[in-house]
Image: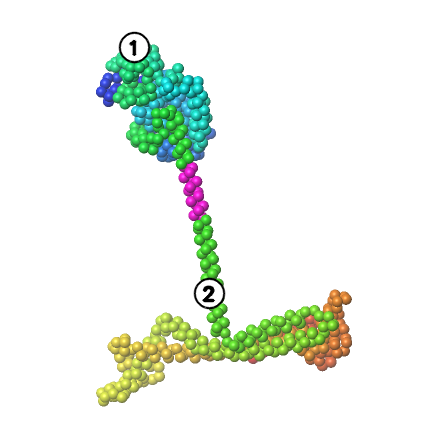
Amino acid sequence: GRPASLLARLFVGNASLQLGCSPPFVRGRLPRLPRLLDDKMGGGASRGRRYKAGMTPDQYWEQVAWPTSEETLTILRFKREDAFKVFQAFVDIDGDNSGEMSVEEFHSYLGMPVTKFSERVFGILDADGSGSLSFEEFSVGVWNYCTYDVRLVTKLAFDIFGSQRPPSSAPPPNRCRCFRRRRRRRRQHHLHQHLPPFITHHPKRNTSSDVDHLGKLDIPECDALIRMVYDVDDVDKIQGPPSGKEILEQIDINGDNEVTIDEFSDLMESHMYILAPAFDLQRALRQRLLGVKYWEKETEARKIMFAGYDSLEHSSWESIKEILTIKAKERQDAATAHDEELQRNEREDLQSDQERAIERHRERQMRRKRKLQQLKAEELPEEVAEKEAVDRLKKAKEDMERDVPYDELQSRLVARKELYDALENLSECAQKARAAREGKMTERAINKDAEAKTDELLMTKEGQKRLKYEVQVQYGQELLHKWSDGNRFQAALAPLFQPPEEEMVPLATTVAVAVVPQSSLAAAREAARTVILDEHREECREEAIEKLEQKKRDQIQQFAKMFEEFEGEYGTVNTKWERLWDNASYAKYWYNWESGATEWTRPAICHKCDEFIDPMDVKCFSCDAPRTRANMELYSGISAAQFKAKRLAEEEEDADSVYTS
């Protein structure tokens, strides 16, 4: 006959030998070796094949499987490369490319027939009760089952074959069931947060052999459990040692014909062969997926990390749901804390940047303030008077530009006199300030500028060569005077230091400079630098004088142009024409307060005789004076454009000749 589980029969002997006993066999059946397993995880079936949506398995993993399952797989300590191996195995099992694993495909992958017990285990992996496993269901279920130790495998078996119930002193069944249902709903509402949909949305399934729902198994129920595990119709068919009857006797430790979860767990610690198919299935999964050593290490890690959740009070899926819930909540809290930390750091950085910007602005303001204070302290009295004169002229211009009616004609005359007085005062103050600045600029030129120019020259090769020459000249002069007043021998040698020609260094001086210590040349070096400095001082003084003369000429031209502009805009200082405002017509007009003449358009007034110039006249025929630049704008003769261009060209030629001279 065939064995209950081809793969299970292979490992039953191993588990029994470790326990020091012989494995039980089914009467009338001989064990057969299972088919050879492929050592390559994921095999080669997934290579070079198209999976879902026309993508290769590698593409589907990168674009779909890993992004959707990353959080769950990371919580379960799967590395990306290990999770990919599990996915490869899933693709190999999913032969029809449906994205789901059927129970037949699952058993075919493990090389074992479908039994009632293996169907129950598949049902445990099938979290949503759809009858097939998605990749996420498969990976979570495989991790959950492969990381079980003996205690948790025992609990899983009891979850399958006997629902946990309170002791006999608990409330009546109906009341207890209602109470547990309400508690389960509250607990599931809490657990469903942060869990994958396949865990949180699954139908209720009754996989228990505890038919009377008392939370414990009696002897008939244990008999049914053993028959289901070993896939036999009668426990007598289970040969020993121990036989089926001996297994039933060993299960009932205290002889009360009932088995609780605690008794069942204690029994499995020393009698693992009772649930040998469960352990065989776990070992088969471990071998096919990532290897036994990997899962043994993960089992130890689970004992440390998830010990608080793997209690005997919870079912297997309640444990995994609580693990995923807590870990997902921890990851979410960590991510929230990380985001808050980033935001806090960003706010602190922003505040620091603002504080630094404010500090830099304050420092700039302080530097500007100190600079202004320094300039004010260094300001000459003539410069202060010049600034006051500028302010006075600005005020006079504002008064002249104000529109006044005929009743305020006298104030207009006063404003005109004040304007030209302020302009004359500014001219005088500007000349005095320029003269005062000349001395200051000359002093700076022969001191600071000459020093800077000398230092800049001495940093070049040409400057070093010049300094060396001057040191030789100065040291030769020093030796000449010193030895001339010395003893006879020195006096006889003194002429050797006399230069034969101008700008030539005697050989004796060159030799002396080469052999004496550098400390002896200090005075000569300082004198040589002074010679170069004096030359630069003279150059800087001449440059400063030339610049000052140019500034003087520019200032004279500037004030001459300013006087011309003022006369063209406001009239001469003694003009009888005034610009007034007519309140009745809301317009400006020009009035001659001496003759009583009135013009509603701006007239051309001669700057010499103060007479009216006809718009068609090219000059003033009263005094034969040419039109000024301002009056040229008012000329409207037949050849006005040609005349204006000729006049402007003549003025520019005169200005160039003045500048050249």
Q: Amino acid at mark 1?
A: Asp
Q: Quadrant of the N terminus?
A: top left
For disc 2, the neighbor class at 10 Å (few under 14, some 14 to 19, many from 20) is few
Q: Which of 535/297 is in front? A: 297
Mark 2 residue element: helix
Q: Are marks 1 and 2 in contact (CB under 8 Å)?
A: no
Quadrant housing residue 297: top left
Q: Quadrant of the C terminus?
A: bottom right
Q: Is residue 554 visible?
A: no
Q: Which of 125/169 is in front? A: 169
Give residue 205's position: percent from left, percent from top: 43, 20
Q: Which of 620/48 is in front? A: 620
Q: Amino acid at mark 2?
A: Arg
Can you identify the residue that label 2 sits on?
367
Q: What whole-number distance in Å separates the C-alpha atoms at marks 1 and 2?
A: 105 Å
Does the magenta-highlighted stretch encompass residue 342? Answer: yes
Give residue 475's position: percent from left, percent from top: 30, 81
Give the numbered dot on residue 236.
Answer: 1
Q: Give the magenta range.
A: 331-346
Mark 1 residue element: helix
Residue at 74% over, 65% down: 586
Residue at 46% over, 49% down: 347
Give residue 141's position: percent from left, percent from top: 38, 26
